[in-house]
Amino acid sequence: MSACGGTDRQELLALRRGTFSVGLDNGNGCHLVAGHHAESFPELSRGEAEVLHRLAKKFLPVEDVRRLCAEHDAVDRGHRTTRFLDRLRNGGWLKVGVSHEDSMQYALEPLRPPPPRREPQDDLVLSRFAMIHRDGDEMLLESPLAWCDVRLFDPVAVGLMASVATQKGSPLDGADEVRRSLLSDLWWSGILVERDGSETSVLSSRQWSPHELWFHEHSRGGHRAYANHGFGGTRWADGTFDPLPARHETPFAGPRIALAQADLYALSTTDPTLTTVIEERSSIREHDDGSPLTLEELGQFLYRSARTRGAATHEGVEYKNRPYPSGGSAYELEIYPVVRHVAGLEPGMYHYDAEDHELVLVTSDGPETRRVLRRARMSSRQATVPQVVLVISARFGRLMWNYEAMAYALVLKHVGVLYQTMYLVATAMGLAACGLGSGDNVHFGAATGIDAMVEDNVGEFMLGRPRVTPARAAQ
């Protein structure tokens, strides 16, 4: 880390977040463990053991660390203390804080062992992958490509980031000691980069947008997941917020329409085989308005692909069972058929009640529903508007009450498996199916009146009667 320079600048050390120690059988050493990262220290002096104990609690100035070793060890072990601290630094076990005039300026918080120290280049700029946000009462600067996070305690340090992001030339020119120290550490961490470096000139970096790389890194069980940041099924909200009920608390007062059920026993003998529907599955975007989808077919399609087959309650949380898989049996997805042309059903937006296998009218045909249909037509690059667009929404709290960091990634996985289930059912029924890559949540919110932070659309799926083309007729 940066060497201390001057009398006003001080370096402080603490054990990285999420670290715990396990004693060795010999009684003189320990394993340090942070997730999948572990290292053995088999021969610790009394002073070194005391240092680890103190560093686990708070920041200590480097001078105090050396003093502790000297006080607890009978023999002068200055060189051994230096080697011990270097090993902790190089292993990524130490947070390093920098203070100026007794005021903490910033701290480096490792996520993995650091690379060798690098001297700053002349023309540096803030990485386009860097992100700064509030974390508790402090500001946190991070990047998916950095080996550490940088916690900023001083407002001047926060303001420095804006100037580094836009200025030309070397940000080190004319910098005072603390500013120079921070910029040097940011370059080392990977949060500052060369202006014309690999972030823009190499495909592997340029292909990523900042939010997608940040999302990928935060939603996987890598270095960050094991740093006590909260990851996975932690039930973090248990005891603070009530879990959402399994059944959608439908706020819609429109009429309810009973749907036809599928005779699964009969279908087990007449349906094409799984291999057949997998091999014949394709995206069919053109619909035959002369022979539209029927209400009975829509009902059978929803019954086979998305009905609730059962429910259970465990430790105060309600769980569901549907034809497609869902992490933690949360089943946060809801389906809203937006209908243009279905025989036996008026145009409009409906909510599919998967428990009672009914449709509930959300809103009649109007500007918002037509925008959803037109957006689907443009997304699929077709000249005609689809007969039905199944808007798939997520009740986020069903997952986010339990899961941290990875919950939204799990939502998108669920959309994928629901798409595939719908594709296979539609293929077996001889219907035209096409999953879409994007939609417009503004129109969903306007049509339903639901707060987007509570529930919002995360997928769209076109459904209809396939238009018979010469090529398809010949198959």
Image (cartoon, helix red, strand yellow):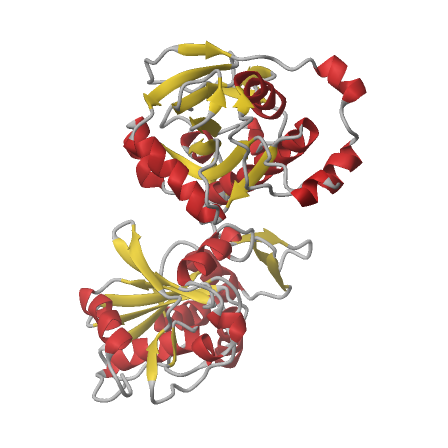
Please tell me which residue is depicted at 38% across the width and 18% down the height of the picture.
361
Q: Quadrant of the C terminus?
A: top right
Please tell me which residue is depicted at 58% across the width and 30% down the height of the picture.
465
| Residue 24, quarter of the rendered image | bottom right
Looking at this view, is 89 or 195 the one in front?
Answer: 195
Q: Position of residue 49 (x, y in %)?
A: 52, 61
Q: Position of residue 296 (x, y in %)?
A: 57, 16
Looking at this view, is 244 or 308 the one in front?
Answer: 308
Q: Is residue 439 visible?
A: no
| Residue 312, quarter of the rendered image | top right
Please tell me which residue is depicted at 48% across the width and 15% down the height of the picture.
344
Looking at this view, is 27 or 128 the one in front?
Answer: 128
In screen coordinates, is 133 left or right of 343? left
Q: Is residue 181 visible?
A: yes
Q: Position of residue 173 (x, y in %)?
A: 24, 89
Q: Is residue 13 above or below residue 163?
A: above
Looking at this view, is 41 or 287 the one in front?
Answer: 287
Q: Is residue 252 above or below residue 201?
A: above
Please tell me which residue is depicted at 36% across the width and 74% down the height of the picture.
186
| Residue 417, quarter of the rendered image | top right
Q: Quadrant of the N terminus?
A: bottom left
Q: Is residue 2 above or below residue 475?
A: below
Q: Position of residue 337 (x, y in %)?
A: 45, 27
In screen coordinates, is 124 left or right of 398? left
